[in-house]
Image (tube, rainbow, N blue to C red):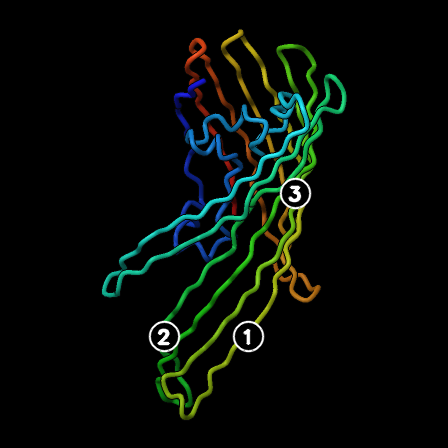
Amino acid sequence: MIAAVLLAAEPPNRLTAQDSQFGIKGLGTPGRWESVRARSTGGAFAPFDAFSPLTDASLADASRMSASIAGGTSWRTIEPTGAAQASLRATRFPALVIAGPLTRRIVMGGGFATYLDRTFGVMIHDTINLRGVQEPITDEITSDGAVSDLRLAAAARLHRRIALGFGFHMLTGSSRVIATRTFADSTNYRTSTARDEVAYSGTGGSASLLLDVTRDVRLAGWLRSDSRLRADIGGRQVAENNLPLTYGAGLQWRAGTQAAFAGTVMWRNWRA
């Protein structure tokens, strides 16, 4: 079958800039909960794909024990004003989904995906006052890590046209942060380096529904709520941030046996 796409839309949110080199001040770059197949069609088929960790109800379509894993690398080029061109590369953590039927109507599944990517590097040039003298400095900050989403989910086929799914999510992960300060006057001032490992934790829950309106038309709806994301250094809490309420809906239409169309809209309510 040839799947012809599609329409995929996601309203802008307050953390859109995180998906750029300027996103280091936020919580991180949000992950995309899609399998390779769903990503290749713009993400519109993700709510209906059992191996995309977006909805739990779609697991009901898994008729046998199966697994899917995905990962990706992106390349970007920036041209800062008055500076040389630079190339950036980012490798996202893979997404893994394992699912299989528990009974004729109930399917269990689990896996992990990237919730937030916390890998970046930045260099800052500045001048500070030391003993009444303006001293040029260079600060280099690097972070390597991510917040992963571990999921345990179940889906039930309540009726041949209705599937309902629920999931429990555990957010965990860490990032290694290295900050280095270099002085232009290396004779009088030594380079200093600080290293820390930040551990993240949180929980969440999700619910979703699949409804086959007709043989060729399917609707999907989902809702996810997460707790506050806690950040610890050396066992001591240093930050706690609100996480978004996520909800969305999708429509899939099979135009005969040779094509399928889908549209998805999703909202993530990020708050400071």
Amino acid bearing label 2? Asp
Label at residue 165: none
Q: Quadrant of the N terminus?
A: top left
For mark 2, give the secondary structure. strand
Tell me if 152 is positioned left or right of 132 in this view: right
Label at residue 126: 2
Residue 131 location in percent, x, y?
42, 90
Q: How many marks?
A: 3
Task: Tell which residue pokes out farthest to the right in this image.
Answer: 103
Q: Residue 212 sits in which quadrant? A: top right
Tell me if 233 is positioned left or right of 30 in this view: right
Residue 119 location in percent, x, y?
49, 57
Kindly tell me whether residue 204 is visible in this rendering.
Answer: no
Up/down of 10 relative to 212, above or below: below
Amino acid bearing label 1? Ala
Mark 3 vs 2, N-terminal side: 2
Residue 36 location in percent, x, y?
49, 35
Which residue does the numbered mark 1 point to in the structure image? 194
